Amino acid sequence: MKTGEDQVVEEVASFDDDEESFFQDIDLLQKHGINMADIKKMKAVGICTVKGIQMTTRRALCNIKGLSEAKVEKIKEAAGKMLITGFQTAFEYSTKRKQVFHITTGSLEFDKLLGGGIESMAITEAFGEFRTGKTQLSHTLCVTSQLPGEDGYMGGKVIFIDTENTFRPDRLKDIADRFNVDHDAVLDNVLYARAYTSEHQMELLDFVAAKFHEEGGVFKLLIIDSIMALFRVDFSGRGELAERQQKLAQMLSRLQKISEEYNVAVFVTNQMTADPGASMSFQADPKKPIGGHILAHASTTRISLRKGRGELRIAKIFDSPDMPENEATFAITPGGVSDAKE
């Protein structure tokens, strides 16, 4: 019988080979006459794949020190030759979508609500008041994403960006006990960073992109707990709202691109605000998630969490492109998120 540690490490090793072909390395541009110095400059700002060039505007590329407009045109042209830039049939796209995997939340009921779990190549946002289980869900996903799952999912590593200082490695140990996996192996597979400002949070995404590229196919999940906390602090009042939303939009766009570029799942948590105008319109619930329309449109799936009796929490699909609006009840146990006992 293999120990949990062997199991976790072995999966990561074996998955390395077949995932390599998912993205084209930016170094391949050398064959098209782009010199290594320019490729290094792009890597320094987190553009590590050919698709990454396609996802970056010419203006943004021109802002990279040492890249002239002529060079940018040449780079764009070379990238265009290597990728399908036009249309493809829905059938062709559906075969590409087969590479999407789902990470279990630890609760079968919750997974069913999400159509299998937290989806890759998408941003899943969970919002709720304090004590509704957002951070507990994040911690549980840190462990479940490392375990082999359904449909040939082999497990992989996690990156956790913490903005509220709520990450606790000891909590991961308790959850690892529930799934009978080795503590050290689980903690080794989670990369942790504490973000202190919204700018720092954005800079960390460059590191994330570089890491996903360096260990292709090894990382499966990126967690940000919580996405809006620092934006709430760094920008105050209506006067700075436009700038805040602009910066937020850039960050969410970056997250969406990273998830598609490297086939990883992105899970973010979000806070709530009391809506002072709601009492006038006789809304049942005057609280709403912060981040406005920008965040609402950027998240692929939005889950609303609320408290139930005792340890129970209720998750509801708030917005999803393919799942109906339903509810699921789950429990928060010492071993993380699990099914509610009737």
Image: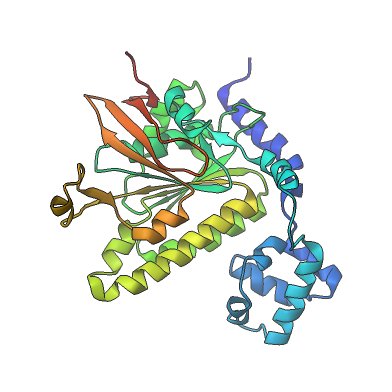
Q: Is residue 326 left or right of residue 277?
A: right
285 to 242, vertically: above or below: above
- When asked about the image quadrant of residue 326, the answer is top left
Name the image quarter holding the C terminus: top left
Q: Position of residue 157 (x, y in %)?
A: 56, 41
Q: Is residue 311 left or right of residue 207?
A: left
Q: Nearer the viewer, residue 30 or 339?
A: 339
Q: Nearer the viewer, residue 241 or 130?
A: 241
Name the image quarter holding the N terminus: top right
339 to 39, vertically: above or below: above
- When asked about the image quadrant of residue 73, the answer is bottom right
- When asked about the image quadrant of residue 246, the answer is bottom left
Residue 194 shows in this picture: no
Q: Nearer the viewer, residue 117 or 49?
A: 117
Q: Position of residue 232 (x, y in %)?
A: 28, 62
336 to 244, vertically: above or below: above
Q: Position of residue 182 (x, y in %)?
A: 51, 27
Q: Nearer the viewer, residue 54 or 213?
A: 54
Q: Is residue 40 left or right of residue 296?
A: right
